[in-house]
Amino acid sequence: MGKKVLVLSGSPRKGGNSDLLCDEFAKGAEEAGNDVAKIRVSEKKIGYCSACYYCVKSGGVCAKNDDMAEILQQMIDSDIIVLSSPVYFYSIDAQLKALIDRTVARWTEVKDKEFYYIITCADEEKESQETTLACFRGYADCVEGAKEMGVIYGTGVYEAGEIKGRPEMRQAYEMGLSVK
């Protein structure tokens, strides 16, 4: 059996450009024989971390009763994590940021992961995505044994679906297919 792949689609738009790239990555990874799960973060109930540190006193159980405990367990159990977000003011969107912040409850258990990053933006310049990429890398820097495996840059796409037919779709599929 292949690896456990968890795709975290931060796109608030179902069928948005970064969401479509996630689908292509997942398709390739499944065809390569991996066990793939995709989570559309905006469809989950994930509260913001309030820094109460209840999780420290409770063995990693968060004070908030929402979908995050299940997602965090999937992150811990996965071999590969794909983080995907459209660029929001040169950063990641709020939905994905809330998820990342909430990993604090058991962050030391999220270790030895291979990371792939998918970023889309309306700007034509790849440089417009560098701060978003830095956010992803900042999280991975906190994950013991993290390895960056690939980045997909979808530039010049704003309207949902604009990415269709572009080389980035094939790149996402092939990147997923390369997961062994």
Image: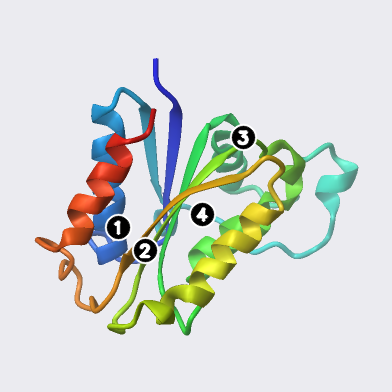
Q: Position of residue 101 (x, y in %)?
A: 66, 60
Q: Which residue is mark 3?
A: 76
Residue 45 - label:
4
Q: Which residue is mark 2?
A: 11
Q: Is residue 51 left or right of residue 136?
A: right
Measure how far apart labels 1 and 3 are at the Cα level: 22 Å
Measure how far apart labels 3 and 2 are at the Cα level: 22 Å
Reading the chain from its start, which is encountered first: label 2 or label 1? Answer: 2
Label 4 CA crowd tier, 10 Å (few <14, some 14–19, many 20+)? few
Three-letter code for the amino acid on which mark 1 is drawn:
Asp
**Mark nearer the viewer, 4 or 3:** 3
Q: Are marks 2 and 4 in contact (CB under 8 Å)?
A: no
Q: Is residue 9 above or below residue 122?
A: above
Q: Are marks 3 and 2 in contact (CB under 8 Å)?
A: no
Residue 62 shows in this picture: no
Reading the chain from its start, which is encountered first: label 4 or label 3? Answer: 4
Q: Quadrant of residue 102?
A: bottom right
Three-letter code for the amino acid on which mark 2 is drawn:
Ser
Q: Which residue is mark 1?
A: 19
Label 3 CA crowd tier, 10 Å (few <14, some 14–19, many 20+)? many
Which residue is rendered at x = 24% and y = 79% of the image?
Answer: 156
Residue 29 shows in this picture: yes
Reading the chain from its start, which is encountered first: label 1 or label 3? Answer: 1
Which residue is rendered at x = 50% and y = 67% of the image?
Answer: 133
Residue furthest to the left in view is 165
